[in-house]
Image (tube, grey):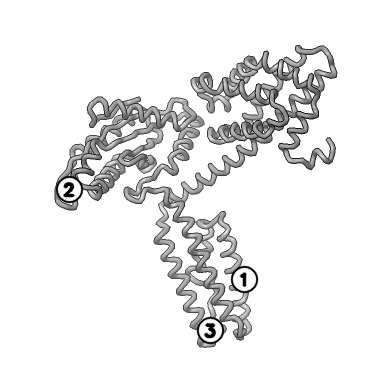
Amino acid sequence: MSPAFMNMSPLNQLKETINGTPGHIRQILRSVVQETGPHCVDLFYKTLFHHERAAIFLEKETVEVKMRPQLLAWIQSLFSTEADQAEDLSELQCRIGAVHARLDIPTDIVVYGIYIIKQALVVGIKEATTNKDDVIDAIIYLNTMMDFAFKFMIKAYDINFRKKVESDEAFRLVSLGHNISYEKETQISTFSSWSTQAFFCLCKGHATDLPTIAESEFGLWLTHKGMSLFKGTHEATEIQHKVRDLDTKIEAIQKSGVIPPEFPTELHATITNLTFLIGRVFRHLEEVENGRDPLTKVFNRRFLEVVIQNEITFALTHEKPFSLVILDIDHFKKINDRFGHLVGDEVLCFVAEIIAANVRANDFIFRYGGEEFLVVLTETTTTEALACAERIRRALAEQALTLSSNDKVTVTLSGGVTSFAGETNSRLLIHQADEALYKAKNSGRNRIVTA
């Protein structure tokens, strides 16, 4: 491998590899893939279904209908691509990597799958030609192209996996129940109190009494709690550096008992800067807190896929059931038309309270649409989920809501229930619950139907 090749971008290396491989070698691979591609795919999935860790990530129906033809198309495209199509090929590998990340398929299983395909194609190459040099060149080309494909895949996998981790962390913050707005007001107030005390000491010339930020109420909060909340933001690093630098200067003033003439100006500039940074980082946390619906205070759809995917992984690895329930308020439009949207808001909050009162602390409630709620019932069978949904439906139907106008309105729900049965796709589960809800609506409403 030449130094010039090593200094190229991966995309240009791919082009160079295609251009530098003799046409008859590339034709051998194209022919082998054309003839043995379906066998490679069969072998790939047969082996993975017998692999204990791999099998839990694969659903047989999805494999047969969608994944088999896609894998075959991928193998064929990999060895039929010309150099001027290399960019499209790299984008395809990135999309495949992103899919693996969304499904939480571990990279070692992906590597194992590529190994299986390589071995099957090596057998095909040996059967396609008796020329030993051509066999060696074809195997080198096979390995190089598969390695490039995996390189692009793993890059996209890494990006999407990082996004998932960030989303999981954001969800963790939300689920802890932080009231970020309250925290923001409290800490800005304590920082302001420290600032006032610092300027009071400067005005009085009390150098030895000048307080450091670390000793203040705000400083203690920042050290033990704030930096955990702010972790990962650029502003957090800046805040840390500025606080450390300012406290170093204050400690020097305390020891010497002398306030340098330029220090008040420096202090004012630093306080202004810190106030801006603190406000900015709290605004970032408020965006995270937007994972809750501002009206009903249940989760919005932002973290729905994170929660369901976590439950899928848990269910597969621990052999535990879980269920989804989609609940829709019957004739909600009529309520809005008759009483107005403010009453509609009251109804939504009332329904959310009823749902919350009838599920456990370990379950998740989402406002799924305008008047739809989705509940993830952890470690719950279909029978148990149906009973829970019925309990919610009856509680709502039997309890009239007294409006702020003293009018009373009775609200009913229709619901669809589905349970996890080996699917690795959250959208499929939601679709099943949605189909059941549709049947409930068509059957006369105010009822629960299972998928």
Q: Quadrant of the C terminus?
A: top left
Question: Disc 3 marks which amino acid?
Answer: Leu
Residue 136 occupies quadrant: top right
Nearest to N terminus: mark 2 or mark 3: 3
The numbered mark at residue 245 is 1
- The amino acid pointed to by label 2 is Thr
Picture quadrant where residue 96 is located: top right
* Residue 28 percent coordinates (x, y): 75, 17
| Residue 83 drawn above or below residue 176 | above
Residue closest to the eye, 370 or 347: 370
Whichever of labels 2 and 1 marks the residue nearer the N terminus, that label is 1
According to the picture, the residue beneath numbered tag 2 turns out to be: 402
Image coordinates of residue 302 in percent, x first then y, are: 44, 44
Q: Earlier in the sequence, mark 1 or mark 3?
A: 3
Judged from the image, the secondary structure of the residue bearing numbered disc 3 is helix
The kind of residue tagged 1 is: Asp
Q: Which mark is residue 202?
A: 3
- In three-dimensional space, the C-alpha distance between marks 2 and 3, rounded to whole angstroms, equals 59 Å
Eyeballing the image, is 111 above or below 358? above
SS state under label 2: strand
